[in-house]
């Protein structure tokens, strides 16, 4: 006799095979999607690097980290005002939202300063937008930040998802690339230039010398502690800023260094920078300590 259909056992076996195939395919598809986003973001970071070099070529002093044209003391806010925008965060002391009409990279990229859009509108300034839907600072005990840039898209708060490496201290000095000539960046291939903002938060939460409760921060691309970063020579890396990646401070730099397997935030042994000028510190005077919250904004 000819049998029609499948037996119960055959049906269960077929369902099991299908479930196994789905289990194998779906994670792979998710990984490919995450990898695609990372590579897309790498292209955006490389573009920002090209704009950085163009700025340096046009700057009389060859400054690598752009300085806002209206900034009197540029250390406090320049980490996000190089391009993109607008955002809901105000310029320190200027009483205005981050305005795209005054961001120098916009002029280089678009040929003119674009008109303002709604803060965080993803239809505009995509070149400065994280494809992993970054949520700015992670809510962390003791990490005092403005709610407009905490667990909310950094792009909406600051007009750009990527923070410039200024490595600021509580007295307004900086050891990062912001306001620093390219020839004063000792190891460009290791020195961080732009990165997803939460990578900066690891300075305070790292398990080596962080000043807050230690722990790995959530990344935006499926790996705990990993963030996209672009270096001062223009190359990109998906770097681990998590546990075990930070190095101990070098005593000769009096805690103004910040380095790890991911590279370095600091430009030691070059002098600190304050308000656009090199600060030659007194050898007998203590150098500035880390501030307890990132980039406290001054008010005139």
Image (cartoon, rainbow, N blue to C red):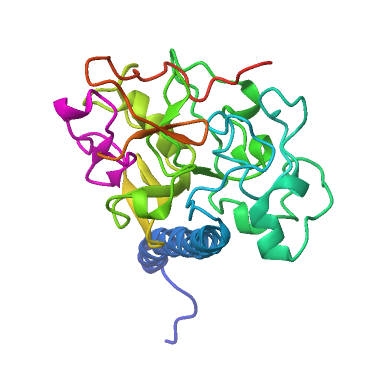
The question of residue 274 being in magenta is answered with no
Question: Residue 76 placed where, x, y %?
Answer: 55, 28
Look at 23% across and 40% down and name the residue there: 260
Question: Residue 28 placed where, x, y %?
Answer: 39, 63
Look at 29% across and 37% down and name the residue there: 242
Q: Quadrant of residue 24?
A: bottom left
Look at 61% across and 21% down and name the residue there: 146
Is there any visible trace of residue 280 in the rendered image? Answer: yes
The rendered magenta stretch, by its main secondary structure, is classed as loop
Is there any visible trace of residue 231 in the rendered image? Answer: no
Look at 25% across and 39% down and name the residue there: 269
User: Magenta part of the protein: which range?
Assistant: 241-268
19 or 117: nearer the eye? 117
* 35 over 158 or under it: above or below: below
* 93 over 135 or under it: above or below: above
230 or 53: nearer the eye? 53
Question: Residue 258 placed where, x, y %?
Answer: 28, 34
Q: Quadrant of residue 180?
A: top left
From the viewer's perspective, is 73 left or right of 124?
Answer: left
The question of residue 262 being in magenta is answered with yes
Question: Residue 147 placed where, x, y %?
Answer: 63, 22
């Amino acid at each position: 006799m000819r049998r029609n259909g499948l037996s119960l056992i055959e049906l269960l076996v077929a369902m099991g095979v299908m479930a196994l195939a789905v289990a194998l395919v779906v994670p792979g598809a998710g990984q490919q999607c995450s990898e695609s986003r990372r590579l897309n973001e790498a292209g955006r970071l490389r573009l920002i690097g090209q704009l950085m070099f163009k700025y340096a070529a046009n700057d009389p002093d060859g400054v690598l980290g752009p300085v806002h044209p209206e900034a009197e003391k540029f250390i406090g806010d320049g980490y996000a005002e190089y391009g993109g925008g607008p955002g809901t965060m105000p310029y320190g002391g200027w009483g205005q939202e981050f305005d795209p009409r005054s961001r120098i990279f916009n002029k280089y990229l678009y040929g003119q300063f674009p008109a303002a859009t709604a803060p965080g509108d993803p239809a505009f300034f995509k070149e400065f937008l994280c494809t992993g839907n970054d949520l700015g600072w992670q809510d962390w005990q003791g990490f005092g930040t403005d709610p407009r840039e905490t667990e909310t898209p950094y792009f909406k708060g600051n007009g750009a998802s990527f923070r410039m490496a200024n490595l600021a201290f509580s007295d307004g000095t900086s050891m990062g690339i912001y306001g620093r000539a390219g020839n004063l960046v000792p190891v460009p291939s290791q020195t961080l230039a732009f990165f997803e903002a939460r990578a900066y938060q690891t300075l305070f939460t790292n398990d080596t010398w962080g000043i807050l409760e230690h722990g790995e921060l959530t990344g935006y691309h499926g790996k705990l502690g990993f963030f996209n970063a672009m270096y001062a020579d223009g190359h990109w890396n998906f770097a681990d800023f998590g546990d075990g990646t930070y190095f101990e401070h070098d005593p000769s730099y009096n805690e103004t260094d910040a380095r790890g397997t991911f590279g370095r935030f600091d430009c030691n042994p070059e002098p600190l920078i304050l308000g656009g000028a090199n600060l030659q510190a007194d050898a007998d005077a203590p150098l500035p300590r880390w501030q307890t919250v990132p980039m406290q904004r001054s008010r005139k």
